[in-house]
Image (cartoon, grey):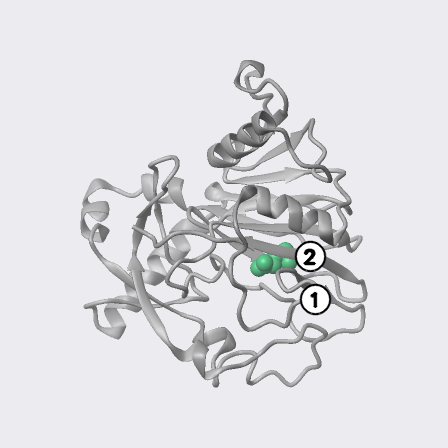
Amino acid sequence: MLAEAARDYRIISVRPEPSGFGAEITGVDLARPLAPEALAEVKAAWARHAVVAFPDQPLTLDELEAFTQQIGPFGEDPFIKPMPGHPNVLELRREPDEKATNFGAGWHSDWSFQPEPPAATILRSEVVPPVGGDTLFCDAARAWEALSPTMQRMLEGLRAVHSATRAYGTRGVFARETEKRTMEIIVSPDADRSLTHPLVRTHPVTGRRALYVSPVYTTGVEGLTVEESQALLGFLFKHMTQDAFVYRHRWRAGMVLMWDNRCTAHFAEGGYDGHLRVMHRTTVAGERPV
Ligand code: SIN
């Protein structure tokens, strides 16, 4: 990792990944309200690196909620039963003997089927398995920037169709699941609805443009045939998730990770059968993609 220029931050220390995508932040205690300057620095580092990890922050659920609200108001989390007494916290839990595929095992940007999908997701690790369980992130802004000008011109102005149907719909993966799952998933006809967002969106803070599609939630491209959509999206999914654009996050217990859903997609890796994994997750409301 490179050391970020010290002059950029007065309070926090930031160690970016060599690519600049992903960074570790130390020098703050997330269990307590951040001073305005510290919060501004955290937000600046997050805008710059898109995925930021805070090691050694074993927050209680109340502290996780309070930190989330310093970033922004809670987002709306559909289709998963929240924690008792904590309507804005999801527990991502997989027991050692669980056979169902781990939650989040497909590239996606959180709740992109909503009219105003969450800007941020914040995940705090409680129990980390000794093997597996990494979370992969792809840099959808760099993926966009790496496309040829001709391809960019072709994509500009297109709208992609997003839906939760493949996951939470009445004929989706969870509806067809036969293995027992600890997390309480709510399959619903509401998930079968769809809407469109720009295929390329502009980040409201950085002004950078990013591909805004994912294999889990993007079901087509407006105005294209099914075959044309599949070919185009297949190319884009492969392009954006190539190793050159991916940051692999390796968890330690008591870590807080915050990612920007507006310019990234993520994938929760399995590989920890026989071990418990427990995470707590909140989202921060976002804006209509433009
Ligand atoms: C998710 O939010 O998609 C799951 C991430 C993880 O469990 O690593």
**What type is the residue that disc 2 sits on?**
His
Q: How many marks?
A: 2
Q: Residue at x 21, y 41 (%)?
A: 149
Q: Residues within 10 Å of mark 1 (few under 14, many from 20)?
A: some
Quadrant housing residue 248: top right
According to the picture, the residue beneath numbered tag 1 turns out to be 83
Residue 167 vertical placement versus 62 (above, below): below
Q: Position of residue 203 (x, y in %)?
A: 36, 42
Q: Position of residue 110 (x, y in %)?
A: 49, 59
Front-lying residue, 196 or 246: 196
The answer to whether one can see residue 181 in this image is yes
Q: Position of residue 95 (x, y in %)?
A: 78, 69
Q: Residue at x 51, y 57 (%)?
A: 75
Quadrant observed for ligand 1 in the rendered image: bottom right
**What type is the residue that disc 1 sits on?**
Met
| Quarter containing the N terminus | top right
Q: Position of residue 184 (x, y in %)?
A: 66, 76
Front-lying residue, 200 or 188: 188
SS at badge 1: loop
Q: Are marks 2 and 1 in contact (CB under 8 Å)?
A: yes
SS at badge 2: strand
Q: Residue at x 53, y 48 (%)?
A: 137
Q: Is residue 216 left or right of residue 213?
A: right
According to the picture, the residue beneath numbered tag 2 turns out to be 280
